[in-house]
Amino acid sequence: MEISSRNVVEGTARSPHRAMYKAMGLNDDDLSKQFIGVCHTGNEATPCNIHLPQLALEAKRGVSDTGATPREFSTIAVSDGIAMGHEGMKSSLVSREIIADSIEVMVRAHQYDALVGIAGCDKSLPGTMMAMARLNIPSVFVYGGTIKPGMLDGKELTVVDVYEAVGAYDAGKLSLEDLKNIENVACPNVGSCGGMFTANTMASISEAIGLALPGSASPPAEDSRRNNVVYDTGVACAKLLEMNIRPKEILTFEAFENAIMMLNSVGGSTNGILHLLALANEVNIDLTYDDFERIRNKTPHLADMKPGGNYVMESLDRIGGIPFVLKKLLDKGLLNEDCITVTGKTIKENLNSFKFPSAEQNIVRTIENPIHEVGTAVILKGTLAPEGAVIKTAGVEMTKFTGKAKVFDREELAFDSVSKGEIDEGDVVVIRYEGPKGGPGMREMLATTAALVGQGLGKKVAMVTDGRFSGGTRGFMVGHVAPEAYVGGPIALVKNGDKITIDTETNIIDLHVSNEELESRKKDWKKPEANYTTGALAKFATLVGSAANGAVTYANP
């Protein structure tokens, strides 16, 4: 049956349903209109989301003013920053699936005709977009906005600076007072982490792929324009419903190519790869690592964004935001210009309507003078990762690293070793059994990577894991290694002292151990006991697939 509010409110048999709506203040005129769900991930768990209930009011006003009836509901969101570095981080990726599932269930149960989705923290953005794709009702996504940077001694700070300061403190390079001073000012207000970390990466992608209004990604959470953007999103969703343009018409293969181009041009988070694969699965599009590499190799890296660069999202906003980057790609014929968007217009039509500041700036380079000739979201394959692995090269000077493995079977053990100063120059830190099934939940390793950087080892060591990295991670750090250790992938067979080579120019990640030796080790390997046998994490571990396919809990045929 087609999802429609008329299934719920029309006819004498639906008199009880109308009575319940009237208990909430609706009248017959309200019930005669189409219903638009206004979903948000607001909570007090994270500054990324704490302001979203207020933004939802603006979206509802936009819906009402355009002649439809808004119905607000909320779902969960996990703060990656607060869950980081401990057992709580295992719930982060799991939350993406729960968010998508919960939005789907709410819409199917109440038969809303269209959907506005408002999200802030890392997994709530792809989770919301996945639900929109799955439901395939007219839908518009809107980001809750970035946090403004903290300031200390004239330097812009983000939460990543706090994580790196912890490493500096452990290494004796920073006093406790200095650490406290950084902690006190790094996150001055509401909004998502300020650099081109995962939230801002996915917000940028939402514009490039056509699910969000052009120019909606970059205004900060506390900027007055954010309210206007959310109001306009409510209006746009009601108009999209009139036009009956649905996500599957927007989320074409060509739109995904534009999204991959955006990911690479801004030096975005490696999580963007995982989430785009998951989103493609929702609309039955066969997106693979080969597509990511093909697009990366023709995409210049243009935006000098933290953590690998120098600027935060607010800085990019001042010069025209994501449309400014997209227009540069469009003018050089790199974008698929005919992709339809939630405006009902093509991405080319949207971008040609913008006027950009002409002032000199250093944030976004020209196509002719990029930061890097090719993109920064690199796919690696080799004997250590036959299905693939990912690395972000933004801000990374080296292209090749060969070192000896120092192996840890969970993140806490690695972090303790780093804190004690036990990691040496030339080591390849291997953290395993942190994959989608093995963790479960594929934890991010920001606490450990930031500690290494803070100790001055960021350019002297490498890391390899079947877990993930925060968008705030920088350095020669390889994640998403597949097959993961828990299913017997080669990473499970690595021993201390084994030589590992990572080469981002040849896309290689190799374990220098003979096939005979690996076969011998495999015979002795035993799958460890599951870390969770009940609850949401156990359910996720049972259902989840490979990181190389987006770590989704179901796959479309």
Image (cartoon, helix red, strand yellow):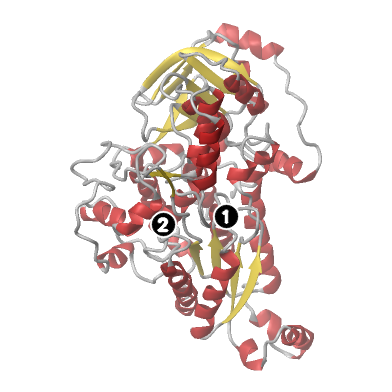
Mark 2 sits on what residue?
A: 209
Q: Is residue 177 above or below residue 334?
A: above
| Nearest to the observer: residue 127 or residue 302 | 302
Earlier residue among tags 1 and 2: 1
Q: Position of residue 342 (x, y in %)?
A: 42, 68
Q: Tag 1's secondary structure?
A: loop
Q: Is residue 371 left or right of residue 73?
A: left
Q: Tag 2's secondary structure?
A: loop
Q: For the residue marked with disc 2, what is the amino acid? A: Ile
Mark 1 sits on what residue?
A: 47
Q: Which residue lies at the image location 45% right of the left edge and 78% below the top edge? A: 239
Q: Position of residue 292 (x, y in %)?
A: 40, 40
Q: Residue furthest right?
A: 534
Q: Is residue 548 above or below residue 403?
A: below
Q: Which residue lies at the image location 66% right of the left edge and 92% below the top edge? A: 28
Q: Position of residue 557 (x, y in %)?
A: 59, 49
Q: Position of residue 171 (x, y in %)?
A: 53, 22
Looking at the image, do the residues carrying marks 1 and 2 touch, with CB atoms under 8 Å apart? no
| Nearest to the observer: residue 490 or residue 287 | 490
Q: Is residue 468 above or below residue 13?
A: above
Residue 489 visible in the picture: no
Q: Is residue 114 left or right of residue 433?
A: left
Mark pair 1, 2: CA separation: 26 Å
Q: Is residue 384 above or below residue 9?
A: above
Q: Which residue lies at the image location 44% right of the left edge and 25% below the top edge? A: 458
Bin the neighbour count of mark 1 within 10 Å (Cα to Cα): few under 14, some 14-19, many 20 and up: many
Q: For residue 3, which numbered disc appears in the image? A: none
